[in-house]
């Protein structure tokens, strides 16, 4: 087979590019179906022409990331593979670095920079900055809530908003857990845990606790939103498919001056009682086309949680289509 030889001048960065025990190279090999050999400060890519061009584009973009002082993880490689198409590689002049993300799309948090990894995620983040109300609809693992919280943290740290309000319906996922012990916070915290997880990924735990104590971050069930006006806030309603039509209308009308609101949900995972209409579906039907409201949709191709999750979703969708 014909091979492509790539030369990287900085051996220290090349070590980071290859990863411990060359695991980064192995990930690229497995996902593209080719071979990458390491010879000194060169990488030799062996495989079909289109795959070699795609691998070369991905390796150059990851090396450029290291030159900027940023790290590389499995998720970053997966994102590079999504963007480093053979078409883009063919169009790029020799030696030119391919930009994975548009300027301004990096979300700065206290722990790490966050970047959209698919075209759908890029459009979603752009709309969250552009519109006062945005919807993110799609399957699990596509980054709907994660990116929404990242945008909220970025806006809080830059002073664009004064507080973050995160909410979810307290609906059990197909199980009856019975009465939970403890005070109100201890009862609702299990439902809110995914929101705490996202925050702790962007901010030091001590700072999260301090911001919660100062009421600059609020995490509360959807039922607690009634009667409030949320001004100068970044507001997220997660798992919105489990809100009723009345709850959705109530929540949307909490939007106050200087605030932004994001509604995320998965229409395939409704846990409401049979016969109860999902508030997410109603909002989508009623608000489509309203100025200042954006709708972004995700598919299994946008799953960044784990490659296998995307294949599980595709298999499930295919089975339902046959039924």
Image: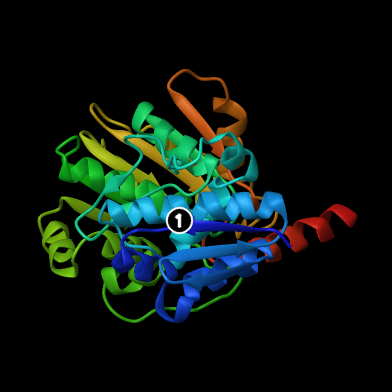
Tell me: 87 left or right of 161.
right
Coordinates of residue 266 in the picture (x, y in percent): 59, 51
Q: Which residue is mark 1?
A: 169
Coordinates of residue 200 in the picture (x, y in percent): 27, 65
Give 275 or 66, whichever is nearer the viewer.
66
In the rendered view of the protein, which quadrant contains the N terminus? bottom right
Coordinates of residue 136 in the picture (x, y in percent): 51, 42
Residue at 51% x, 35% y is 93
Whether residue 309 is visible here, answered yes or no, is no
Tell me: 102 left or right of 26.
left
- Report helix, strand or loop for mark 1: loop
Residue at 32% x, 43% y is 235
In the rendered view of the protein, which quadrant contains the C terminus? bottom right
Whether residue 25 is visible here, answered yes or no, is yes
Residue pushed farthest right?
Answer: 322
Give 34 or 320, whichever is nearer the viewer.
34
**Mark 1: few/some/many CA within 10 Å (<14, 14-19, 20+):** many
Residue at 50% x, 72% y is 38
Tell me: 311 left or right of 99.
right
| Image vertical order of residue 121 relative to residue 170, above or below | above
Give 221 or 49, whichever is nearer the viewer.
49
Give the number of callouts.
1
| Image vertical order of residue 81 relative to residue 209, above or below | above
| Image vertical order of residue 321 relative to residue 123, above or below | below
Q: How is the image coloured?
A: rainbow
Coordinates of residue 96 in the picture (x, y in percent): 44, 39
């Amino acid at each position: 087979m014909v091979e492509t030889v790539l030369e990287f001048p900085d051996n220290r960065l090349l070590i980071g590019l290859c990863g411990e025990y060359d695991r980064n190279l192995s990930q690229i090999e497995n996902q593209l179906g080719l071979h990458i050999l390491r010879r000194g400060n060169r990488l030799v890519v062996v495989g079909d022409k289109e795959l070699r061009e795609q691998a070369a584009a991905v390796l150059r973009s990851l090396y450029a990331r290291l030159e900027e002082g940023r790290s590389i993880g499995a998720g970053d490689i997966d994102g590079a593979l999504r963007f480093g198409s053979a078409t883009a590689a063919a169009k790029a002049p020799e030696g030119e670095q391919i930009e994975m993300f548009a300027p301004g799309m990096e979300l700065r948090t206290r722990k790490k920079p966050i970047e959209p990894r698919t075209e759908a995620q890029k459009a979603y983040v752009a709309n969250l900055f552009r519109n006062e109300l945005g919807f993110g609809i799609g399957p699990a693992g596509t980054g709907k809530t994660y990116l929404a919280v990242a945008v909220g943290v970025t806006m809080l740290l830059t002073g664009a908003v004064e507080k973050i309000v995160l909410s979810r319906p307290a609906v059990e996922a197909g199980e009856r857990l019975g009465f939970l012990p403890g005070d109100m916070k201890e009862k609702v915290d299990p439902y809110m845990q995914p929101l705490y997880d996202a925050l702790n990924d962007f901010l030091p735990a001590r700072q999260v606790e301090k911001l919660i104590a100062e009421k600059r971050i609020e995490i509360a069930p959807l039922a607690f939103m009634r009667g409030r006006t949320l001004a100068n806030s970044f507001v997220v309603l997660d798992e919105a498919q489990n809100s009723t039509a009345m709850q959705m209308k109530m929540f949307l009308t909490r939007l106050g001056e200087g605030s932004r609101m994001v509604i995320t949900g998965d229409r395939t995972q409704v846990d409401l009682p049979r016969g109860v209409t999902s508030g997410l579906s109603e909002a989508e039907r009623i608000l489509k086309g309203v100025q200042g409201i954006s709708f972004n949709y995700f598919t299994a191709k946008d799953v960044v949680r784990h490659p296998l999750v995307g294949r599980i979703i595709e298999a499930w969708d295919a089975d339902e289509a046959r039924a």
